[in-house]
Amino acid sequence: MRLLLDENVPKPLYQALTAFVLNVVTNDGRQMQRPREVAAIAASGLHRVEYPHKHHGLAGMGIAIATVAAGLPGALAVLQEANDQRLITLRSIDPTPKARYQLIDPLADPPKFWISYSTD
């Protein structure tokens, strides 16, 4: 397979993805709404994998990397078996704090066997 990562892919994610054999990977969700780009992708015969996300900065990059890392193995398996061109949109991970981590205040709700220390 040939590799094409568009200019919207952040550099750290680009470096991580180049370890895989892919065709087109993009986070440009509007790309498929532009007739000339759609025609170019269709004519190329390349598979297209999109990982949409709406978050910026470090959180956005983390969400993008997590989305690709979680979805890419399944997507690659599908592409490996495909006889023709495929378009895949990876579903973003849930970025809400409740879905990403658990917070415990050991003074208010100590874990089993927690040793309490006085804050006096």
Image (tube, rainbow, N blue to C red):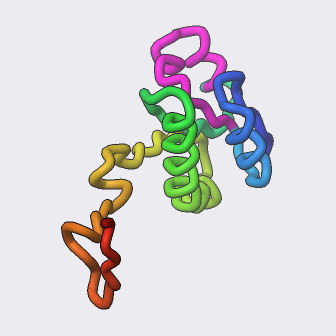
Q: Is residue 36 magenta?
A: yes
**Residue drawn 71% across and 47% down?**
17
Q: Which residue in the rendered view is the most extreme toward the bottom?
A: 113
Residue 111 place in picture, x, y as percent: 28, 80
Q: Answer with the quarter of the image where residue 38 lies.
A: top right
In which quadrant will I find the C terminus? Answer: bottom left
* Closer-to-camera residue (54/87): 54
Residue 30 place in picture, x, y as percent: 48, 17
Q: Is residue 114 magenta?
A: no
Q: Is residue 92 above or below residue 81?
A: above
**Residue drawn 31% across and 45% down?**
96
Q: Which residue in the rendered view is the most extreme toward the left?
A: 108
* Closer-to-camera residue (3/12): 12
Q: Is residue 79 left or right of residue 99?
A: right
**Residue drawn 66% across and 18% down?**
40
Question: Magenta residues, as a range?
Answer: 24-41
* Closer-to-camera residue (2/29): 29
Residue 77 place in picture, x, y as percent: 58, 62
**Residue drawn 67% across and 33% down?**
45
* Closer-to-camera residue (36/54): 54
